[in-house]
Image (tube, rainbow, N blue to C red):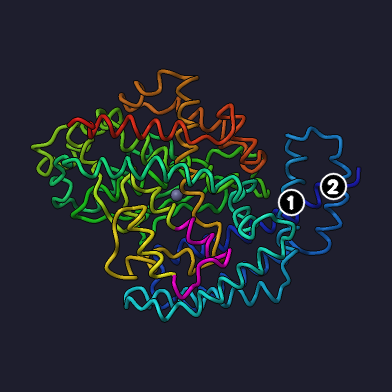
Amino acid sequence: MAESAFDRLQARLADVMDLRGAEFLLKWDQSTYMPPGGASARARQRALLSQIAHERLVDPEVGRLLEQAEREVADAPPDGFEAASVRIARRDFEREAAVPPAFTRAFQEHTAATYQAWTEARPADDVARVLPLLERSLDMSRTLAEFQGGAEHVADPLIARSDFGFTVAMLRPLFARLRETLVPLARRVRACEPPRDDFVRRSYPLEEQFAFAAARVAEFGYDMRRGRLDPTHHPFAIEFSIDDVRITTRGRHDYLVEALACTFHESGHGMYHQGLDPRLEATLLADGTSAGVHESQSRMWENRIGRSRAFWSYAFGPLRSAFPDQLADVDAEAFYRAMNVVRPGVIRTRADELTYDLHVIVRFELELELLEGTLAVADLSEAWHARSEEVVGVRADTDRDGVLQDVHWFSGPIGGAFQGYTLGNVLAAQFWDAAVGEHPEIPAEVARGRFETLTGWTRSRIHRHGRAVDPLALIHQVAGGPLDPGPYERYLREKYEDLYPSDG
Ligand SMILES: [Zn+2]
C-alpha cells in the first residue's frame, strides 16, 4: 500500500518539531550554562533554526499534503488522533503562511533590537530609550493581527496565538469582574496585621533549597529520569521531546519562599509535557493546548498545593530536617502563614497569590488600550503608574519597577501575552473542584505527602490530550461547564478570610 498523504504530512511535521526541539535546547543552554561570550553566535544559530522550522512548515508541499490528508481523514472520528493532527496542522499552517516572509524577518530583527535595548534601559531606568521602539512594536503588532483577518477585535488574533478560542469579548468581562471582586478583597487583607515571617528571611544555602524543592517535585510526579532541574535568572520549563522536559528555578539565600514557589510552579509546566500521550511525540499535538491551561497546571502546584495548609502539614517536617537551625522556633502552621503573607508590592513576579491577578489586570487593560489607540505609547509610563495605584494599590518610584519590569512587550508582539496567567488561576480552581469532586480523598492524601491521585487525574483528563482537544472544549470536558471565575473567587475569599479574618 502506498504511503498515505497523512503519513507523509506527519513525517514533514516531525522535522518541524525536531528543529524546534533543537532550537529549544540551544535556548535552554543559553539560559543556564552558556558563557556570556556565546550570546551573539547563539542568537544567530537560534534564528537560523527557527527560520528553517518556519520554512518547513509553510512549504507549499505541506499545503498540498494537507489538502489530501483532509480528504483521507474526512470520515475519521473528529476527536481522534488523525483528525486532530490534521486540524492543528491546518491551523498552524494558515497562521504562519498568512504572514509574508519579509514581515516575519523585519519583525524578528525589530524584536531582537527592542529586547537588547530593554536589557540596557531597564537597569538605567531609561524608558525614553525604548518608547520609539515600542511605538514600532505596536504598529507591527497591529499589522501582524491584520494578516490573520476577520477578527472582531485587533487583539483577538494575538490572543489566539497563545489562548486559542479566547477573544476580547470573552476576556474583558472576566477581567472586569475579577477587578471588582479582588481589588476590595486585597484592600481589606492589606489593612490587617500580617503574620510573622521573619524566619523565611534567614540564611538558607541555595544548594539545599534546590535539593529540598527537587525532592518535593519528584514526589508530585515530575519524572527526573525524563527531566532535570537547573538554576537560571528567569525560570521556565522547556521540552526537547516528551521524554526530555527540563525545568529551571531561581532563589535567594535570604528569602526561602522564592525557590520553593518557582520550582513548584515550573514542575506543573513540566509534568504537563511529560504527561502527553507518547503517541504525540514529534507531532504538532505535542504541546499544551493553551497558555492558560498550561498555567493552570503550574499555578495548581505552586499555590493550590505549595501554599496550602495540607501540604505544609506534611512538608514542614522534611523542610525543618533540611534547615534545623533556621526553623528551630517555627511550626507547620506558622510556616503556612508565612507562605501566604500579603504585602503591597510593585513587581508582578514577586506578588503573593491574592494580588497576582491585579498586576495582570493592569497589563491586560493597558495593552488593549494601546492596540485600540485610546492610549498613546508616549503616555504609557504614566498610565502604568496611575493604573497600578488604582488596581494594585501601589505606585512604583521608577519605570524600572513600572513599565520596564516585564520582558513581554519588549520581546514579541504587544497583545496576547498576559491573559494566560489569570486564565491559569481561574482554571486551576475549576479543575481543582472537578478533581476533588471526583476524588474527595485528594486533600487528605496531600496532607500525607501522597500526590498520585491528583497527578493521575490531571494526566488522564488534561495532559495526555496535548493539543488534540482545543482549550474551550477541554474546559467543558474537565470542569463540566464554561470558563467560570466563581470557584477561584470562592477559594480566595475562604482562604484569606481564614488567614485574615474580617473581624480580626
Ligand atoms: Zn508559568
Q: Is residue 64 above or below residue 426?
A: below
Q: Toward which corner of the image does residue 93 lie, by quadrant?
A: bottom right
Respond yes or no on whether mark 1 lies under 8 Å from ligand 1. no
Q: Position of residue 192 (x, y in %)?
A: 19, 40
Which residue is at 56% across, 35% downward? 462
Disc 2 marks which residue? 69
Provide the residue span drawn in magenta: 363-379
Q: How many marks?
A: 2
Q: Is residue 452 magenta?
A: no
Crowdedness of circle 1 by 10 Å Cα count: few (<14), some, many (20+)? many
SS category of the residue bearing label 1: helix
Residue 342 in percent (x, y) is at 25, 45
Tag 1 residue:
89
In the picture, measured across the screen, residue 339 lies left or right of residue 230, that is left
Give the left or right position of residue 31, taking residue 211 as reference: right
Say which of 40 and 112 sits in front. 112
Q: Quadrant of the C terminus?
A: top left
Amino acid under label 1?
Ala
- Classify residue 307 as left or right of residue 134: left
Q: Residue at x 42, y 47 (%)?
A: 266
Q: Disc 1, disc 2: CB below 8 Å?
A: yes
For the point 63% across and 48% down, the residue is 164
| x and y percentages locating residue 150 in the rendered image | 74, 57
| Residue type marked 2 | Ala
Graded by Cα atoms within 10 Å as few (under 14), some (14 to 19) or many (20 or more), the crowding at tag 2 reads many
Residue 144 percent across, percent down from the top left: 66, 66
Q: Earlier in the sequence, mark 1 or mark 2?
A: 2
Where is 315 relative to 68, above or below?
Answer: above
Q: Secondary structure at mark 2?
A: helix
Instruction: Indicate whether 273 appears above or below 459.
Output: below
